Amino acid sequence: MNEIKETLLQHDISPSYHRLKIYEYLLDNRIHPTVDRIYSDLIKNIPTLSKTTVYNTLRSLTEKGLVSQITIENNEVRYDAAVDFHGHFKCMKCGALYDINLDPEGLPDKIDGHSITERHYYFKGICKNCSSR
Amino acid sequence: MNEIKETLLQHDISPSYHRLKIYEYLLDNRIHPTVDRIYSDLIKNIPTLSKTTVYNTLRSLTEKGLVSQITIENNEVRYDAAVDFHGHFKCMKCGALYDINLDPEGLPDKIDGHSITERHYYFKGICKNCSSR
DNA sequence: ATTACTGCAAATACTTTGCATACCG
DNA sequence: CGGTATGCAAAGTATTTGCAGTAAT
């Protein structure tokens, strides 16, 4: 818990209780949750939490580089406690979102003269579980 | 124009005038337009066009595989006359969206046991033009 | 006449904003 | 006290839906 506070401080985010809890949730639940999911899980323990605060906090965390937004379907932004480079796979049938290990070797810094700061690789299809049925 | 009609017919889309024009627009304007952009450009020549029709048509074209949706920012879906495999680069400064040639060699059909039907690679950063200023 | 296409308006969903209150140092 | 954080409600934006009018075969 104190580590989390440290991390926030190191990234210029003053560690209010709500912010701590939201960031902690993302670290503990690597399920790429949507805003709604985060909110409805946390409200159980933090009854005063508002969705606005979730939005505000996620914006700060994203701006400071602590989490990343995953945009695959345009009607649901999902959040990921930013870590190392990896891709995502979304099952079109059950909607699950899986992490995909990708080889980080030889990732380009530039393409066609453009400077790259973010790389997003995602795949869609039918997941293991759905296709085995 | 007749080729376009043929393509629609081959994909089970009855080629109404509006649908022809929308698909033609996408083929002629490889600028990854948003719905709004498509609508506001076409309304100049087709005064009776409604945005609903644009949405409907784009949905059909997407379902039939003639165009693909590009989801990079969650508040703007862009449309691309589907062609060969390529990636996209979005400039965070000017907002331009560039096509990126990617090596289609060795694209996986399966990852971690999941069957892949779509692959999306996109990058963000500062484009050539913006960084040279 | 029957069927499909279109367009308006209302409905829905997600996110942002304005502002007053509550909290913290 | 002074400044920041929070929460509610309203506003904004993008998209979908219901339905009636229109066109086409």
Image (cartoon, coloured by chain):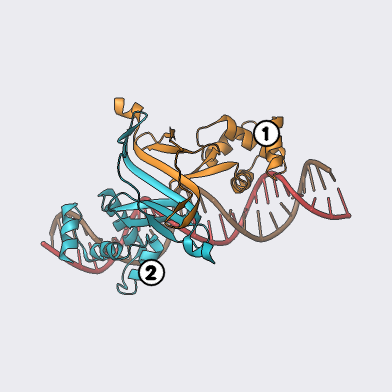
Chain colours: A cyan, B orange, C red, D brown
**Do tag 1 and tag 2 residues touch (Cβ < 8 Å)?**
no
Q: How many marks?
A: 2
Residue tagged by mark 1?
B4
Residue A102 in the figure: left or right of residue B107: left
| CA neighbours of label 1 inside 10 A, class few (<14), some (14 to 19), many (20+) | some
Q: Residue at x 23, y 63 (%)?
A: A20
Judged from the image, the secondary structure of the residue bearing numbered disc 1 is helix
Residue A42's mark?
A: none
Residue A27 at x, y = what percent? 27, 62
**Viewer-side label of 1, 2:** 1
Q: Residue at x 42, y 56 (%)?
A: B112
Can you say whether A128 is above or below B110 in the image?
A: below
Q: Tell me where residue B7 sits by quadrant.
A: top right
Residue D9 at x, y = what percent? 41, 63
Chain hosting mark 1: B
Can you say whether B17 is above or below B73 in the image?
A: above
Residue B59 at x, y = what percent? 60, 48
Residue B70 in the figure: left or right of residue B90: right
Chain hosting mark 2: A
Residue tagged by mark 2?
A40
Which amino acid, by three-letter code, is at mark 1?
A: Ile
Nearer to the camera, B30 or B119: B119
Residue B93 in the figure: left or right of residue A76: left
Which amino acid, by three-letter code, is at mark 2?
A: Ser
Judged from the image, the secondary structure of the residue bearing numbered disc 2 is helix
Residue D10 at x, y = what percent? 43, 58
Have a look at marks 1 and 2 and say if they share a chain.
Answer: no
Q: Residue at x 38, y 46 (%)?
A: A120
Query: Is residue A74 in view from this perspective?
Result: no
